[in-house]
Amino acid sequence: MTASDFAPRLLAWHGTYGRHDLPWQHPRTMYRVWLSEIMLQQTQVQTVIPYFENFLERFPDLADLASAPADAVMNVWAGLGYYSRARNLHKAAQLCMSQHHGRLPEDFDALLALPGIGRSTAGAILSQACGARHAIVDGNVKRVLARFFAIAGDAGSTAVDRQLWQLAESLLPETGMADYSQAIMDLGATVCTSKKPQCATCPLASGCRALAQGNVLDYPGRKPAKPVPERETYVLLLRTKSGDMLLEQRPDKGIWGGLYSLPEADDADQSLARAEGFITTRSPAPIPLPAFIHTFSHFRLTIRPLLWDGCAAKSQIRDNARMRWATPEELLLLGLPAPIQKLLKRLP
């Protein structure tokens, strides 16, 4: 098998074994493909599907998304993680309305200039929605190419990344780009997987250099794993007699960026100091609730909740634009981080 056989074999395999029933494929419009590609960044297909369908039901087109309040967008996104993706979607939709006549641009550079869209994502959108000849080099594609050509080294390094891009662009077929892009991603996701590749059923097996060498799992190369850092935070559940809960909007950068969440503190003493302005002499002592761990991609966070009931009037936060009281009904509508949502549902 030669490199010239790569695309034809992949397309033939895809016709029989590829994924043809993904919700963003029917119809395969720019808006639907763009939304799916943003959601699929660092998130698996099966996790994305229900979020995609729910998001599309709430914001069926670009105009609906652009005109929606930011809180509404974050609410529908809540639980999917990497919240900067939702903020970028919202900003990009608004830019499309103001600068691109209410459409996602079909020009590669114009699409690439929108927030949240990198080189691979732009290629994925245009190849699938428009049939344009643009390569994709996401994690799945990197793995397929690194193994087929036995490309040594860390796939995240500049030199290896450049080499993989050159190979990806050299293999593009003249036609059938939508199917080809889906095919190479499907092969990486379902056959050429990271831990248990199914080489016996791979349409590219006869030309795969890593398989010929007998060391498929050595590709692509990775940086040595580092210990997962441990962090801790106290969250303050300050609740009025009517059930309103004090919320604080997080900074745009960092975890849960831009979402409303519970006020936080570094330790128990700081928690008491932050709560002091909201508790009254009649307020009971805080109730420590069971701590729990939430795991992010780059660290583990131990969350220690403290609950105060019977807190003071709402007027005390009128000078703080990032804080608000939310009624029990409003808590259901705001885009709160998933672990905070679960905590609130377990409250006594």
Image: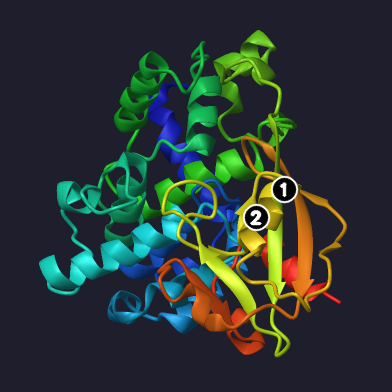
184 up-or-down from 160: above or below: below
Q: Quadrant of residue 196?
A: top right
Q: Quadrant of residue 247?
A: bottom right
- The image quadrant that residue 252 belongs to is bottom left
Determine whether label 2 and label 1 are within 8 Å by CB.
yes
In the image, 263: left or right of 71?
Answer: right
Q: Is residue 21 visible?
A: no
Determine crowd level at label 2: few under 14, some 14-19, many 20+ residues with C-alpha closer than 10 A: few
- Residue tagged 1: 269
Is there any visible trace of residue 222 in the rendered image?
A: yes
- In the image, is residue 251 above or below residue 184? below
| Most distant residue in the front direction | 281
Q: Residue at x 30, y 31 (%)?
A: 169
Where is residue 222 shown, x and y percent of the image?
A: 58, 19
Give x and y (percent) for residue 51.
57, 69
> Which residue appears at 29% of the width and 63% of the height?
91
**The residue under label 2 is which amino acid type?**
Ala
Q: Is residue 215 above or below residue 119?
A: above
Q: Can you identify the residue that label 2 sits on?
A: 273
* Badge 1: residue crowd in 10 Å (few <14, some 14–19, many ≥20): few
Q: Describe the element under mark 1 as helix, strand or loop.
A: helix
- In the rendered image, residue 43, in percent from the top left (x then y), is placed at 58, 50
For the residues labelled 2 and 1, the Cα–Cα distance comes to 6 Å
